[in-house]
Image: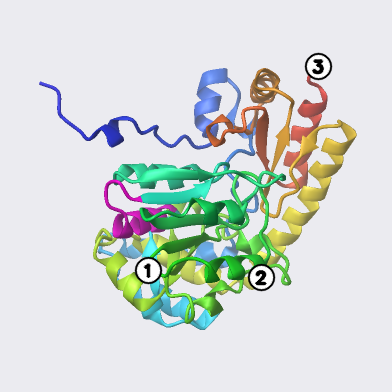
Amino acid sequence: MAITTPKYISELEPYQGGRPIKEVSRELGISAEKIVKLASNENPLGISPKVKSAIDECVKEIYRYPDGNGYYLKLAICNKFILNSDQIILGNGSNDILELAARTVLSPGDEAIYSKHAFAVYEIVTKAVGGIGIKAKPSEDLGHNLDEFIKLISKKTKLIFIANPNNPTGNLIGRSEILNFLSKIPKHIMVVLDEAYDEYLNDDEKSIAFSWLSEHKNLLISRSFSKAHGLAGLRIGYGVGDTEVINLMNRVRQPFNVNLVAQAAAIASLKDDDFINQSRLINNQGRKQLEECFREQRIQFIPSYGNFISFNLGDETKAMMYYQHLLENGVIVRPIQNYELPSFLRVSIGLKNENDIFIKYLRSFKK
């Protein structure tokens, strides 16, 4: 006898990430050392020496449960951003924060609004609890059109997801535009501002959303240690919001959802501004390198504020031909049909030599 499951679960499509190096090595018979992965927006610098030391030290304690409340990591976040610990919730990656938000506010039949070309997890966490995903038409540059979001608000709307910068398009919404948008949203609707790539922004572009929390108690800000901090494999992120909202989210949070090593690594990373600054510098240089190549090859691309660039190859067939050509030469990038951008590929910005290899095989494709 087959198990029964809600229709909204059976209709879900699992999340597909960038292909792992070892998988491509097995499939194509290419040495793993010769493969360049530019598919998952990881930090090509890896982790900082301070983080490595913290990991080495805490490994001795992995037979013990982690601090389920994450006291010292929350303290480090508070010291960094001038927050109170009861405004913070920790997650198993920022994906966990997004899921906790959906589980906290959505009931079956409730609606969540997100952009047509937005992070795939928004749709997954919405539908996984029986919610209805409402996609807003994008702006001309394929980013968020906040006026369209407002038009879509209904009596069933309980949640709004906004990524800034946006993945996979890389667009950035200005501070004043977001603040104006928040002022128009009914207070019973949670707005999740996903800032996974904020560390890559220049100082005059960085988010100041933490300072808006006292006025906008329906705002939840999501941050990640997976990108500029280089801790993708440890799965750690956090959310910041009103104390009452955080209290409710903690009621559906799994106990010990952030492991011991991840907490120690995140604490050390928050104290290493030099590493983050170096990561941003390398990313800025790599972005210019790739943009010059796209212009030279007359390939349309979306100017990005993150550590990736999405570029348009004209149609889905040609995009997949480029993808396969790159893959067969040991370069992993990301098709983004699941983001309703079938003619695009997304490439993460790597170190100069990694970008050089990508550029070499992009140029060698026989059109």
Q: Main secondary structure of the magenta part?
A: helix
Indicate whether 344 appears above or below 123.
Answer: above
Residue at 69 percent across and 25 percent down: it is 326
Indicate whether 249 appears above or below 76.
Answer: above
Q: In the image, which residues are magenta?
A: 95-110
Query: The residue tagged with tag 3: helix, strand or loop?
Result: loop
- CB within 8 Å, label 1 to label 3: no
Compared across the picture, whether 1 is left or right of 112 comes to left
Disc 3 crowd rating (10 Å Cα; few below 14, some 14-19, many 20+) is few
Distance, label 1 to label 3, CA atoms, is 49 Å
Residue type, numbered disc 3 = Lys
Magenta-colored stretch includes residue 109: yes
Q: Which residue is mark 3?
A: 367
Q: Earlier in the sequence, mark 3 or mark 2?
A: 2
Q: Which residue is mark 1?
A: 89
Residue 14 is at least partly visible in this image: yes
Residue type, numbered disc 1 = Ile
- CB within 8 Å, label 2 to label 1: no
Q: Earlier in the sequence, mark 2 or mark 1?
A: 1
- CB within 8 Å, label 3 to label 2: no
In the rendered structure, find residue 176 and report the number of the disc placed on it. Answer: 2
Query: The residue tagged with tag 2: helix, strand or loop?
Result: helix
Disc 1 crowd rating (10 Å Cα; few below 14, some 14-19, many 20+) is many
Q: Position of residue 85 (x, y in %)?
A: 39, 80
Distance, label 3 to label 2, CA atoms, is 43 Å
